[in-house]
Image: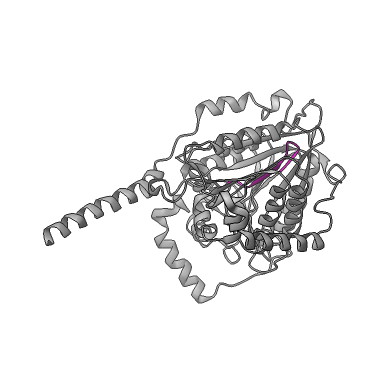
Amino acid sequence: MKKYIGILAKIIGIILVMILAVNIILPLIKRNPDSGYAKELKQTVFTAESGENVSGGRTKEKKRERIRCIDDNKDALLWRLRMIGNAKKSIVLSTFDLRPDDSGTDMIAALYTAAEKGVHVQILIDGIYQKLFLEKSPVFQALTAHQNVEVRIYNPVTNIMRLNYRMHDKYLIIDDSMYLLGGRNTNDIFLGEKKTGINIDRDILVYEEQEGKGESLQQLLVYFDTIWNEKQVVKKKAGSAGNYKETYKKQYHQLEERYQTLKEHYPDIEDYKNWTEDTYEADKITLVNNGTQAARKSPKVLQAVEHIAGQGENVVIQTPYVICNSYMYQELKKIAEKAELKIVLNAVEKGSNPWGCTDYLNQKEKILNTGATVYELMNEHAVHTKTVLVDDNISIVGSYNLDMRSTYLDTELMLVIDSERLNEEIRNTEDIYMEKSKEVKPDGTETEGIKYKKKVLTPEKKRFYAFLKIIIRPFRHLL
């Protein structure tokens, strides 16, 4: 018996080593930048010499798509509800983290109501957060069972050899006329009226007056169709779907009551018509992505950012945190050699991601050595926004964090938007953030902004970060 136990233990040990190697060591082997994509970038709308889409040029194409920037969490929920409430044919929701908390359940109630009206609803969710928060949620199971709802899971956690490859996209598409894309997850941390324990983020609403004519909308629809049909995406079983109305009668009644309350609180979510009046024209919008496969990826989003930023003179990068390898530092250095580069990130004292804060403590000197000026932001709430500004007309907004996970492992989407009005609007926000920050120059010189509020880490927090500084080093590529 002992002999067989020993053999079994060795087998289990070998399996564990294999899992460890595949999930921790394999992602260390980074894919090189895509040389074909680099050539493609030189021929696309990102090239200044063609007169399109970067500083120094202007597209001559007819303006079509209209935009609105959404930075407030309460507004972010309201605009989502308006979009869903006005859907006539189809809804696509792709999200990294949907939870059945207050705002998440509001969204589920709105999606259920749309499905009841005959709208075809497709929902794509990352496997880890589906498992953590939705697997046992009665209201989500009820939504999944509805005949007009399809739910698919990106890279379910049952595939233990691919645990690190996540879908980080966040967008909502309505019919063939509008979409919303940004960095917000679908829960109380990012949506609704909650005042504590929240993050600030940014969405871009894109509206097309001529249905089916929006160039970036068509790009997003193609992207969604590709990822929806990826081999690592599986259909979620609806359970009792044949008799779903009776099986989930209680949950549907709850969702109907909740939606009625939403209509009382937000009276225009089904009658809102001012899409044109409350948006403004963009010269051009282009979607960039890292690829849809649940596997190691080439750093295409970072390649695009460097290519565009490298043609500007003034560049601001807003990111929750910075976790870079040598290639990423090199790309930042390329930008800083051509332009004045500023990086705005959460100060360690205020950041909501302990891994990102800890890595900054370890890597601060390397970040400054790129030539960038860093602004350590002390905002009231942690800022989860991902944005790059290039000169006075280009804004790049979406889900991409300046870290190795976003660069090599996760799916990511960013909109490259040519609009002086949007650029100015975001720059005004960044100026406020910089006033709330400690400015750190490449030579280490520190200057506190006029609205900077100093906060001292507690001894417990200092010990916590000192401990993390040691243990994260082998795993920082996964954070």
Please say if 66 is above or below 428.
above
**Color scheme of the displayed model:** one colour
Residue at point 79% right, 26% down?
Answer: 61
Image location of residue 419, percent across then percent down: 77, 38
Range of residues picked out in magenta: 169-179
Image location of residue 47, percent across then percent down: 67, 27
Image location of residue 281, percent across then percent down: 82, 38
Residue 178 covered by magenta stretch: yes
Please name whichever residue, 49 or 39, is drawn nearer the observer in this view of the structure.
39
Please name whichever residue, 454 or 300, is drawn nearer the observer in this view of the structure.
300
Please say if 280 is above or below 16.
above
Task: Locate residue 378 relative to residue 133 in the image: left or right.
Answer: right
Residue at point 77% right, 29% down?
Answer: 58
Image location of residue 98, percent across then percent down: 60, 55
Image quadrant of residue 54? top right
Residue 438 seen in the current view: no
Please name whichever residue, 297 or 131, is drawn nearer the observer in this view of the structure.
131
Residue at point 71% right, 54% down?
Answer: 110
From the image, which quarter does the N terminus lie in? Answer: bottom left
Task: Locate residue 456 relative to residue 180 in the image: left or right.
Answer: left
Please name whichever residue, 105 or 74, is drawn nearer the observer in this view of the structure.
105
Residue 177 seen in the current view: yes
Q: Residue furthest bottom?
A: 459
Residue at point 17% right, 59% down?
Answer: 5
Q: How many marks?
A: 0
Residue 148 covered by magenta stretch: no
